[in-house]
Image (tube, rainbow, N blue to C red):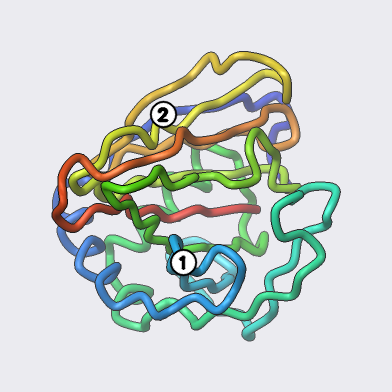
Amino acid sequence: MMQSENFYLELGQLSEQSVDVLAPSFDALPPNPYMDGAFRLRRYSHFNASDSTLTRLPTKAFVQSGNINTYQGDVERIYPEIEDQIIHSDAFAEMFRHFKRMGGVNDDTPIEVHQMRIIANSQATTEAAPEGVHQDGFNRLAVFVIERQNINGGEIRVHAAQDASPFVSHAFDKGEFVVLNDARFWHSANAIEAANDGDAHMDVFVLTA
């Protein structure tokens, strides 16, 4: 349950210390066996967050209706859990504090967390959001961009309707984030491409409730 259905969106910034703690964990993301595995690595966990206590809930498959996700909807996907050392860090807890406070998420509301690396190369663009302009089917959603490495594009965009031009479009980086009402707004992201031949990726946490 949400405290206020009148919430729209809010922008924020993680502390520099939290970004430094979270960023290295993306290097340990495992291969992804699903349709987007060639360009997106992921871990996935879900939690109850009450006061200062974060409780990991049992592992479950992630599935979205084909009406919501036209790219790989109605597919049960099971991803490795987010690593314990990240979950027990103050940096991880900071994300939950911002998400709950800004979005009005009540204690003990299950919160799902996706940790993703989107990989780019210099030969072709990579769709950061292959679903296009979409909603995730939740009441609240947050995108925390931890790092942009050697990429062009990848701006996070927020739309008032699926066919509307974005009224927010920003290349979030270094812990910048947006919390939004997923039932009211739509979101997307520009495709990314490598700026040169070096390692190129965008690292994000997505929280939903």
Secondary structure at numbered mark 2: strand
Label 2 Cα neighbours within 10 Å, binned few <14 / some 14-19 / many ≥20:
some
Q: Nearer the viewer, residue 41 or 82?
A: 41
Would you say 114 lies left or right of 147 here? right
Horizontal and vertical percent position of residue 112: 59, 63
Q: Nearer the viewer, mark 2 or mark 1?
A: 1
What residue is rendered at 74% in x and 75% in y? 76
Residue corresponding to mark 2: 11
Determine the image quadrant of residue 152.
top left
- 153 or 61: which is nearer to us? 153
Residue 143 shown left or right of residue 86 in the figure: right
Total numbered circles: 2
CB under 8 Å between discs 2 and 1: no
Q: Alpha-carbon neighbours of circle 1 within 10 Å: few (<14), some, or many (≥20)?
A: some
Residue 206 percent across, percent down from the top left: 50, 53
Residue that badge 1 annotates: 38
Q: Earlier in the sequence, mark 2 or mark 1?
A: 2
With 53 as the anchor, is 182 left or right in this view?
Answer: right
> Which percent across, then down, holds residue 75?
76, 70
Cα–Cα gap, marks 2 and 1: 30 Å
Q: Which quarter of the figure has residue 108?
A: bottom right
Is residue 152 shown above or below 168? below
**Residue drawn at the location 20% of the way across and 40% of the way down:** 195
Horizontal relation, residue 165 to residue 203: left or right: right
Say which residue appears at 61% left-offset and 67% top-offset.
35
- Residue 59 is drawn in which quadrant? bottom right
> Residue lying farthest front?
123
**Mark 2 residue type:** Leu
User: In the image shown, does 100 or 141 lie closer to the viewer?
Assistant: 141
Q: Residue at x 50, y 27 (%)?
A: 157
Q: Amino acid at mark 1?
A: Ala
Disc 1 element: loop
